[in-house]
Image (cartoon, rainbow, N blue to C red):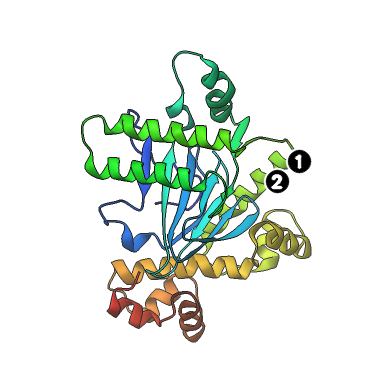
Amino acid sequence: MDAARRERREHGTSAFPFQIYPALDGSEADDSDFIPYHWHPEMEIITVDAGRVGITIADQVYEGVHGDVFFAAAEELHEIRAAGRENQFHSFVFAADFLQFARADQAESELLAPLAAGRLRFATALRVGRPGQAEVRALLAQIMRACLARAPGYQLAVKAALLGIVAVCAEHGLLEGRKARPGADYKVRQLKEIVAYLSEHFAEPLTLPGVAARFGLSPQYFSSFFRENFGRTLVQHINSLRIEQAARLLRESDLPVMEVGFSVGFDNFSYFIKRFRAVYGVSPSHYRKAGIA
């Protein structure tokens, strides 16, 4: 999934605006351990299927465990971190208006239209054992089986299960009104601009004063603002982007390991190895040789 900034790729097709990541055929298994901050106009449901997965939605950081379900609203900043094969997740991405009816019945007017318009949203976290969690997981499992089998009419089966999720969440009080907060829109725009800038320039020499000045802020304020909203320091975020790109280059290119480190922005080879090992538990060379993802 291209997650550098606001996604421009189409999820599914115009006729069936629904997609599961990573792909169920295993073709994306090596490219799904870290999905950097991104946003898109579609809704997203994220399931933790094994181990522990770090998930950030808006300015809230979660550690998801097997069975947890998370919901990211349309245009909401989110990030997924699942380094190692023992930590697995799936994302179900779909357009909100995919669920709407042509006829304005009560479900349309009270649930589906407000969801599509952003006046209503799913509660962000649905933890194991919470009311509705087992039903939502069962419906998502139905969706995965339907997409794997691709029998005639499977698109309707997917849509029916998604509508079932809306019904379950409504039943258990897991649909919330969107509350406007003073300055919230400006803050979100600023966060998205920061994410986009860092995603484009992470391989360049970056400093806290330089990045702060880019956004007209003092280094002290920018540092506090960044940590408060992203749950990490600027340096930690830049390093995570560099390590994610380094892992991709190790999988997909024949560049020497040292050149990989320099190409993603590390000017100290030993530091690159240290940071890579902290994320993946092995050196870059072992990662490449073992085909670890």
- Asked if the residue at tag 1 contacts the one at tag 2, i.e. Cβ–Cβ closer than 8 Å, the answer is yes
Label 2 neighbourhood size at 10 Å, few (<14), some (14-19), many (20+)? few
Residue situated in front as seen by the camera: 93 or 48: 48
Q: CA distance from mark 2 to mark 1?
A: 6 Å
Placement of 47 over or under 81, stated as above or below: above
Tell me residue 229's x, y (percent): 68, 56
Q: Amino acid at mark 1?
A: Gly
Residue situated in front as seen by the camera: 176 or 245: 176
Does residue 203 show up? Answer: no
Task: Give the residue drawn at x 40%, y 35%.
Answer: 161
Residue situated in front as seen by the camera: 254 or 289: 289
Task: Give the residue drawn at x 55%, y 17%.
Answer: 106
Task: Give the residue drawn at x 55%, y 51%.
Answer: 78
Question: Residue 144: which quarter of the image?
Answer: top left
Residue bearing the label numbered 2 = 187
Tell me residue 224's x, y (percent): 75, 62
